[in-house]
């Protein structure tokens, strides 16, 4: 491929970030879609695959005696530190990656070459798995108050909205069009979620173009129509998810927020969620904390606090909780907007829906939720996640924050979600991977023009096919936990917001719990189920035999006893327990030869590698992609066994220690 | 002495407030010799609320009009409020609680009166922990012997009668070494690491003082430890004080092992917090967790200001260091601070949990606590429990006991109807006849009805060392403990129930591997 200056560099070292003494020697390959590092160690030949679309930044550091370091930061929070022997090679790799990581045409993205070897029919069925019309029906629509509107047919009114939209029956096309002209980017109020228990809705829009005094009769009528569509309540909430100051500043630009005097029976509420630029910087700061080497507890906690990240997560959650309460407890409909109504509005509407409706806490329901509130309503995936080379100021971790909110809820309500943490992590990964077509472009209109469904595959079908990996064994589909609204404690609970190391440090296995409760319980469940099936089969057989005996026929069963499955308990005991360096700076016990001291752990590690619980996504996907030259021999993941040369490093340190 | 003399009033009507997430209880309040009782009547749940008066740390009373309020601060940092009808009644109850909760005498404490149905006195007491442990290691090595030099507690009042020492060292030498160590705590074996043939020892600081005194027998003892491990074995002395603090200790008669006097041994300083600063850290954290005004903006820095998680990190790191020395280096490890009774025990017991699969079983853990925590000092024992919780979070399948067990130990270490945590030393315990006149906590906890709460249904014996991550990202605030009075525990309780359900569904199909190991032998 034209952009690859050098397809292969040998004797490259991949540095282990936690203990910088460990490094794996191997070969680096650049392909049209991936960066691949293959370790030389003959028994494992461990591979690390990075999709170009995952690359966030590439940093060439000052050359040292050992070579030229290249730092690759990924959007899925993987961090790769390579040391390339020759400066020239390093430069070639750097220049190639700079270009490969910034495609300029959609056609360059991986999903257009990704071929999971499904036939056309399977691909089409994959795209039909998640059907929003079905979802609106599930909510109980259309009904006496809400109807499907065709006003946006051919995207005539709003090009970032979908064509299928639900609006109050009393809102005529005239009202809708009038209202749309009074809203940023013509994103007029439409239904996002209908709570059929009490006929209350959550609607969404962009900000009104109210400036300091402008009014729009149709817009006022639109809000009135929304209120009338929930006859049980005599007012609606209008929630502006921006900080008040930001909203006021917008007035000077002819935008702004609803004046309570002009709209009858609305209660206006600001909920201060910061804008995309603040969030981008906040993530940046948090990732810097994650990258600290052996931070003290104070370094970490202060850094985390200063990043503001958890504060922002809480702000989004608070907004969602406010809306969920308004709907479920006050029985009041809510109109949510921010500026354009595609970032904070999407976050808040989906958090509120998740709190209100147990369906969204199921595997399929969660896919529907993302399809509805994010994909269909024109969340700008391409701009926010930098799929194509564009304005870096447009990039912001908006959906990452939503995904984290879900995780925070899962931590609080361990039995309320059908899916597990891995599901969230894999969705996050694929939002950036561009391996599937779902998250391409900035709107439904663009996706249609690009004929995404004919040319790419759907992630939802892929996840659904592998749903066994994503189930939460603790999920209880009984009323107490999963039906109805999730109730968060009334007392302020700052502690409930925790740092998500499973996401932001997910590639540093050493930092994660070494044994997985989820995997263990799933194995147990599976085992139990198999035993039950066997029991059933045996009972059936017994019945048959008895019948046969009744007929006085001799039966000689040659069928062997169904073998008892090997105990899951032993196989699940694979503890990836590589100790880290506990001696701090003193280097008190520099190991003579780490591989020797480590031998039993090492043994177990190989076992762990073979059945790695968190399959490295890139490696997995590539098995399907049919990239032939480097087929995966073993899924990467887990810690690597310390290599020979690292032992030498440690020895030199010991010398220092001994003389000290 | 009769308790009745201290009880000023029979009963009163009162309302009990137990915290933001708990409904208030109304009923008849009553003080007995050991308890404060509130009986809301047979229809209510619970129908009886009970508080051991020993757990009361401080009491405040206020009266207004014809009613009064008593605020009880408990040793476990719970705050309870009682609204009582009648001024006289309030004052009488307050005086009764004050008098009864401050009784010092061990033998009038509740464990000496507690006689629950279904338990027999003398059951499940580990009468001779060192003897039992010695039997275990004698199967592996001949290098160590059981010494009864401390039979009458004359060498060291805080050691048990029997201790495990190098075979090559005789009792006279032990006596001399004891005189050279603070409180007589000479180096004794804490754990024998069979896979590498190395040992973990503990002691108190040597009394080198300003004059830099030496003790030939003490030096001989440590030399013998290395010689018996294997020729050329190395040793590390993990001092839980900073180098500076250890040096300063010389001014008051203490000190550290001089390098030249103990060939083969190297000193490492890993300062660990203990005593008052640790208690303050604990109190600050409890306050922070219960503070409804605390905003998210400053929560993490406040958490950091409490220092508790830093202490957890330091304690775990030091234990890992000691364990790593044994497992990787094949080195012998001696741990001590000053008195050798607090952070020392924290390090030695955590190192064993990391290395020794047996100590991670229900029975093994109970033995470990009996053996190591002869004297419990509240905050450091809590720090130990927190560290164990962190291990359990990182290795959820490797401990046979669950969070419930750690919480139960926490509660019982403050105030308990059982005798296990009474007294500060073996000597006192013998004097008070604790083991024959009170019930052992283990007999209470090992009852079948407690198992669903205490046991970890996910437990799978893991023969390997469990190396935890001590990076800040891997350590968490122990919500189950620090937030249990302020945060509704239902979701996690439901989850625990579900875990049990799934795990036991399976186990009824197969064998029950955990049961045989569960009951400690008498």
Image (cartoon, rainbow, N blue to C red):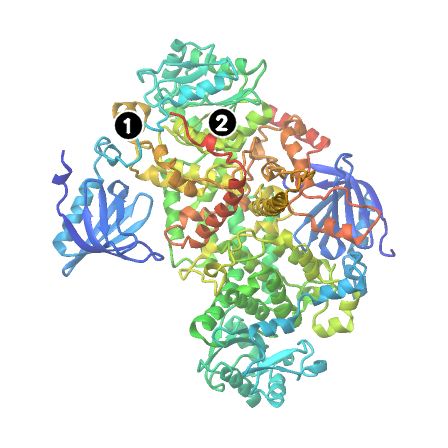
| Chain bearing mark 2 | B
- The residue sitting at 51% across, 82% down in the picture is A229
Q: Residues within 10 Å of mark 1 (few under 14, many from 20)?
A: many
Please tell me the numbered disc located at residue B238. Answer: 2
Disc number at residue B434?
1
Provide the chain ID for the residue under circle 1: B
The number of numbered badges drawn on the structure is: 2
Q: Is residue B341 left or right of residue A451?
A: left
Expressed as whole percent of the image width and height from the top left, the position of residue B120 reads 30, 30
Answer with the quarter of the image where residue A23 lies.
Answer: top right
Mark 2 element type = strand
Question: Is residue B17 visible from the viewing direction of this image?
Answer: yes
- Asked whether B39 or A55 is in front, the reply is B39
Residue at 51%, 51% (x, y): give it. Answer: A302
Residue at x 72% of width, y 31% of height: A645
Image location of residue B277, percent across then percent down: 38, 40
Near-viewer residue (A287 or B84): B84
Which residue is located at x 49 percent, y 80 percent?
Answer: A230
> Relative to A232, does residue A119 appear above or below in the rendering?
above
Secondary structure beneath disc 1?
A: helix
N-terminal of the pair, mark 1 or mark 2, is 2
Question: Which label sits in the foreground, 1 or 2?
Answer: 1
Position of residue A95 in the picture relative to residue A176 (left or right): right
Q: Position of residue B95 (x, y in %)?
A: 16, 46
Do the dots labelled 1 and 2 sit on one chain? yes
Is residue B241 visible in this depiction of the protein? Answer: no
- Decide: marks 1, 2 in contact (CB < 8 A)? no
């Amino acid at each position: 491929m034209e952009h690859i200056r050098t397809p292969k560099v040998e004797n490259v070292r991949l540095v282990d970030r936690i203990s910088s003494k460990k490094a794996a020697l191997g070969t680096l390959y650049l392909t049209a879609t991936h960066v691949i590092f293959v370790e030389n160690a003959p028994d494992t030949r461990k591979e690390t695959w990075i999709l170009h679309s995952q690359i966030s930044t590439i940093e060439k550091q000052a050359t040292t005696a050992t070579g030229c370091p290249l730092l690759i930061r990924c959007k899925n929070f993987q961090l790769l530190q390579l040391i390339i022997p020759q400066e020239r090679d390093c430069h070639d790799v750097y220049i190639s990656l700079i270009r490969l990581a910034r495609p300029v045409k959609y056609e360059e993205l991986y999903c257009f070459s990704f071929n999971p070897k499904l036939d056309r029919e399977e691909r089409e069925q994959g795209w039909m798995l998640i059907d929003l019309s079905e979802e609106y029906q599930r909510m109980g629509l259309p009904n006496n108050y809400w109807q499907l509107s065709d006003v946006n047919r051919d995207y005539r009114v709003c090009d970032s909205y979908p064509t299928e939209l639900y609006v109050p029956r009393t809102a005529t096309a005239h009202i809708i069009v009038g209202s749309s002209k009074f809203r940023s980017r013509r994103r007029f109020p439409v239904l996002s979620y209908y709570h059929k228990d009490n006929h209350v809705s959550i609607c969404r829009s962009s900000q009104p173009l109210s400036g300091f005094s402008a009014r729009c009769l149709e817009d006022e009528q639109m809000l009135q129509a929304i209120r009338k569509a929930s006859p049980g309540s005599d007012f609606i909430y209008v929630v502006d998810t921006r900080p008040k100051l930001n909203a006021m500043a917008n007035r000077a630009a002819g935008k702004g927020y609803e004046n309570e005097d002009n709209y009858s029976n609305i209660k206006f509420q600001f909920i201060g969620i910061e804008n995309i630029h603040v969030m981008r910087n906040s993530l940046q700061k948090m990732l810097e904390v994650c990258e600290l080497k052996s931070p003290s507890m104070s370094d970490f906690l202060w850094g985390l606090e200063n990043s503001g990240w958890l504060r922002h997560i809480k702000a989004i959650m608070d907004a969602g909780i406010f809306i969920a309460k308004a709907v479920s407890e006050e029985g009041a409909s809510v109109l949510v907007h921010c500026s354009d109504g595609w970032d904070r509005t999407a976050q808040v509407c989906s958090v509120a829906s998740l709190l209100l409706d147990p369906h969204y806490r199921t595997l399929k329901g969660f896919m529907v939720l993302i399809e509805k509130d994010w994909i269909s309503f024109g969340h700008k995936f391409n701009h926010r996640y930098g799929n194509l080379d564009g304005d870096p100021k447009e990039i912001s971790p908006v959906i990452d924050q939503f995904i984290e909110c879900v995780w925070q809820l899962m931590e609080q309500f361990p039995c309320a979600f059908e899916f597990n943490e891995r599901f969230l992590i894999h969705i996050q990964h694929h939002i950036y991977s561009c391996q599937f077509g779902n998250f391409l472009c900035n709107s439904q209109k663009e996706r249609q023009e690009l004929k995404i469904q004919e040319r790419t595959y759907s992630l939802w079908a892929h996840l659904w096919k592998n749903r066994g990996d994503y189930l939460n064994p603790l999920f209880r589909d009984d009323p107490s936990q999963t039906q109805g609204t999730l109730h968060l404690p009334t007392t302020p609970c700052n502690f409930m917001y925790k740092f998500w190391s499973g996401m932001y440090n997910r590639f540093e296995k050493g930092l994660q719990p070494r044994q997985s409760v989820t995997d263990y319980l799933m194995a147990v469940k599976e085992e139990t189920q198999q035993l039950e099936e066997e029991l059933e089969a045996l009972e059936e057989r017994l019945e048959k035999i008895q019948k046969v005996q009744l007929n006085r026929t001799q039966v000689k069963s040659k069928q062997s006893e169904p073998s008892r499955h090997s105990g899951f308990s032993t196989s699940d005991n694979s503890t990836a327990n590589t100790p880290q360096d506990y001696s701090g700076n003193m280097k008190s016990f520099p190991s003579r030869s780490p591989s020797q001291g480590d031998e039993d752990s090492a043994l177990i590690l190989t076992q762990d590698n073979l059945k790695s619980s968190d399959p490295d996504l890139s490696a997995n996907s590539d098995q399907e992609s049919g990239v032939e030259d480097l087929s995966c021999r073993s899924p990467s993941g887990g810690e690597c066994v310390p290599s020979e040369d690292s032992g030498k490093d440690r020895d030199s340190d010991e010398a220092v220690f001994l003389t000290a | 002495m009769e308790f009745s003399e201290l009880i000023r009033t029979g009963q009163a009507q009162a309302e009990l407030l137990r915290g933001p997430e708990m409904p208030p209880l109304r009923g008849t309040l009553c003080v007995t010799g050991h308890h404060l009782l509130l009986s809301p009547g047979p229809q209510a749940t619970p129908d009886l609320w009970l508080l051991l008066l020993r757990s009361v740390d401080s009491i405040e009373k206020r009266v207004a009009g014809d009613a009064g309020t008593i605020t009880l601060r408990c040793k476990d940092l719970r705050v309870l409020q009682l609204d009582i009808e009648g001024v006289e009644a309030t004052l009488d109850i307050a005086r009764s609680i004050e008098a009864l909760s401050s009784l010092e005498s061990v033998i009038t404490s509740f464990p000496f009166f507690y006689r629950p149905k279904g338990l027999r006195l003398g059951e499940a007491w580990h009468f001779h922990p060192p003897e039992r442990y010695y039997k275990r290691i004698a199967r592996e090595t001949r290098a160590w012997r059981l010494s009864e030099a401390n039979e009458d507690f004359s060498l060291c009042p805080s050691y048990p009668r029997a201790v495990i020492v190098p075979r090559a060292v005789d009792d006279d030498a032990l006596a001399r070494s004891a005189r050279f160590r603070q409180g007589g705590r000479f180096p004794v074996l804490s754990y024998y690491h069979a896979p590498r043939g190395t040992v973990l020892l503990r002691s108190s600081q040597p009394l080198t003082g300003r004059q830099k005194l030496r003790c030939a027998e003490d030096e001989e003892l440590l030399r013998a430890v290395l010689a018996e491990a294997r020729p050329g074995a190395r040793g590390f002395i993990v001092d839980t004080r900073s180098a500076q603090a250890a040096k300063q200790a010389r001014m008051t008669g203490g000190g550290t092992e001089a390098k030249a006097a103990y060939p083969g041994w190297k000193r490492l300083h890993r300062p660990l917090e203990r005593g008052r600063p640790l208690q303050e850290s604990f109190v600050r954290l409890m306050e922070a967790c219960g503070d409804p005004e605390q905003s998210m903006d400053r929560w993490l820095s406040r958490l950091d200001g409490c220092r508790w998680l830093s202490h957890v990190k330091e304690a775990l790191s030091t234990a890992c260091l000691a364990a790593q020395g044994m497992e990787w280096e094949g080195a012998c490890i001696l741990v001590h601070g000053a008195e050798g009774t607090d952070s020392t025990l924290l390090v030695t017991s955590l190192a064993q949990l990391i290395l020794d699969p047996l100590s991670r079983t229900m029975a093994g853990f109970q033995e470990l606590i009996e053996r190591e925590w002869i004297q419990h000092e509240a905050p450091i024992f809590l720090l130990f429990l927190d560290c164990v919780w962190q291990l359990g979070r990182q290795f959820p399948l490797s401990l046979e006991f669950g969070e419930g067990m750690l919480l139960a130990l926490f509660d019982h270490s403050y105030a308990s109807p059982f005798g296990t945590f009474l007294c500060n030393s073996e000597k006192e315990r013998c004097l008070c006849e604790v083991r024959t006149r009170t019930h052992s906590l283990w007999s209470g906890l090992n009852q079948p009805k407690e198992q669903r709460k205490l046991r970890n249904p996910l437990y799978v014996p893991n023969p390997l060392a469990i190396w935890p991550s001590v990076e800040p990202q891997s350590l968490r605030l122990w919500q189950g403990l620090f937030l249990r009075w302020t945060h509704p525990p239902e979701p996690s309780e439901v989850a625990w129930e579900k875990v049990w359900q799934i795990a036991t569904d399976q186990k009824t199909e197969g064998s029950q591997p955990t049961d045989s190991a569960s009951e400690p032998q008498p």
